């Protein structure tokens, strides 16, 4: 039995061999991962991590794939997600405990129901809590890290470790978690408010999102971070690239920083659009756009211009 077969045998949760990442990304793009694993619980996760580490199996962590571009060739390693398994949460007064697999939208709604303010501007941000913490997800002035107390991670040795929020640096769509640590839960201290105020803030954020984003099509949200000089979408638009198509991928006419999949887009089509946008904006405005989407399975230099 090779090490993959042994890993499959010992996994108590879901273990999918050669699983196509098209099914696990909001873009609907991506080739197969050697295995896509949803551990049954923390103990299962610890055993999987220890085994992968000991047997030098490349291991990648994902949430619900709403910020991912996976290559057409796929991922030479195992992909672990906690969604649908490690996803409990608990609200006690203004204290909120939640595990990484909880969908962010669900968590925000539960906090709003409890008249807790702090996360409501994130309503409509797709994905899991784990992904939101890694990305320091934010919208309309709020970021997931704003009311964070601590985060628990698991190492590749299967040990848990708790970081106080100050021990992790959070910045615009970025955090300093190691890629060798999987985020398993977090605690927040929110602000006790009243139903009307929290509901109003949530509706405002929700309305702004519907007006500004092309939500009818599959995408991974903003492709680039906004540079210091202004909005990435502004530069892509001014460069005349809105509506540019490569295969079934298109730079959205609605929001130029969203690239959408009309059905059969390949990662290679999106890569062409990314390179085109970076090159054109750099040549026209002297601004180098940095990727916000996380990429998996590409050779280094793929996105360079
Ligand atoms: C229509 C649309 C709108 C969006 N709007 C916004 C927005 O307004 N604001 C915003 O910030 N983002 C937005 N996004 C992007 C995306 O929703 C966020 O980045 C989200 O937080 C990603 O969560 P996820 O669970 O899907 O993570 P994934 O996309 O699966 O992963 C993102 C990163 O986190 C890592 N990761 C995920 N889970 C874990 C874990 N448990 N432990 C360790 N590493 C992990 C992955 O390795 C990867 O590097 C949007 C996306 C879409 C499709």
Image (spheres, rainbow, N blue to C red):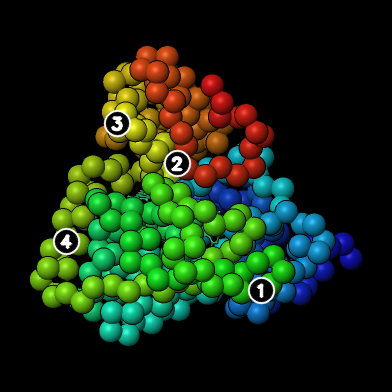
Residue, x 41% and y 74% (percent of image)? 187
Dot 4 or dot 3, earlier in sequence: 4
At 58% from the left and 64% from the top, the residue drawn is 182
The outermost residue toward the top is: 284
Q: Earlier in the sequence, mark 3 or mark 2?
A: 3
**Is residue 48 shown to the viewer in this render?**
no
Q: Quadrant of residue 4?
A: bottom right
Identify residue for label 4. 201
Q: Residue at x 67, y 34 (%)?
A: 299
Which residue is nearer to you in this view: 3 or 194? Answer: 194
The first of marks 4 and 2 along the sequence is: 4
Q: Which mark is residue 292?
A: 2
Picture quarter with the C terminus: top right
Q: Is residue 78 above or below residue 157?
A: above
- Residue receiving disc 1: 159
Q: Residues within 10 Å of mark 4 (few under 14, many from 20)?
A: some
**Inter-mark Cα distance, 1 to 2:** 30 Å
Q: What is the spatial separation of the Cα atoms under label 1 and label 3, in whole angstroms?
A: 42 Å
Q: Are marks 1 and 3 in contact (CB under 8 Å)?
A: no
**Front: mark 3 or 2:** 3
Asked whether mark 2 lies closer than 8 Å to ligand 1, one says: yes
- Along the polypeptide, which appears first: circle 1 or circle 3? 1
Discs 1/2, front: 1
Q: Taking 297 as reference, is 204 above or below it?
A: below
Relative horizontal placement of residue 51, taking residue 79 as reference (left or right): right
Q: Mark number for residue 230?
A: 3
For numbered disc 3, what is the local secondary structure? loop
SS under mark 4: helix
Q: Nearer the viewer, residue 67 or 22?
A: 67
Residue 21 image offset from top left, x and y in percent? 58, 50
Judged left or right of residue 16, residue 94 is left
């Amino acid at each position: 039995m090779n090490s993959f077969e042994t890993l499959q045998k010992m996994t108590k949760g879901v273990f999918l061999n050669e699983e196509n990442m098209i099914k696990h990304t909001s873009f609907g793009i991506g080739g197969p991962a050697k295995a896509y694993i949803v551990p049954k619980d923390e103990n299962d996760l610890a055993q999987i991590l220890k085994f992968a580490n000991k047997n030098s199996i490349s291991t990648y962590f994902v949430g619900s794939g709403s910020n991912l571009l996976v290559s057409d060739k796929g991922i030479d390693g195992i992909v672990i997600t906690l969604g649908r398994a490690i996803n409990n949460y608990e609200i006690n007064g203004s204290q909120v405990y939640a595990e990484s697999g909880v969908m962010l939208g669900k968590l925000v709604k539960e906090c709003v129901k409890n008249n807790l303010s702090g996360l409501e501007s994130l309503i409509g941000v797709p994905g899991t809590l784990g992904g939101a913490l890694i990305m320091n997800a934010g919208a309309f002035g709020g970021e997931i890290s704003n009311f964070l107390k601590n985060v628990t991670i698991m190492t590749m040795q299967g040990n848990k470790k708790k970081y106080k929020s100050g021990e992790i640096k959070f910045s615009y769509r970025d955090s300093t978690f190691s890629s060798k640590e999987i985020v398993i839960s977090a605690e927040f201290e929110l602000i006790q408010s009243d139903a009307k105020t929290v509901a109003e803030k949530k509706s405002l954020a929700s309305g702004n999102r519907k007006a500004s984003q092309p939500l009818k099509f599959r995408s991974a949200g903003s492709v680039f971070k906004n540079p210091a000089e202004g909005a990435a979408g502004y530069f892509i638009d001014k460069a005349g690239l809105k509506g540019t198509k490569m295969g079934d991928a298109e730079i959205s006419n609605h929001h130029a920083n969203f690239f959408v999949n009309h059905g059969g887009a390949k990662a290679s089509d999106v890569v062409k659009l990314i390179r085109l946008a970076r090159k054109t904006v750099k040549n026209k405005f002297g601004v180098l756009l940095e990727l916000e989407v996380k990429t998996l399975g590409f050779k280094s230099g793929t996105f360079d211009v």
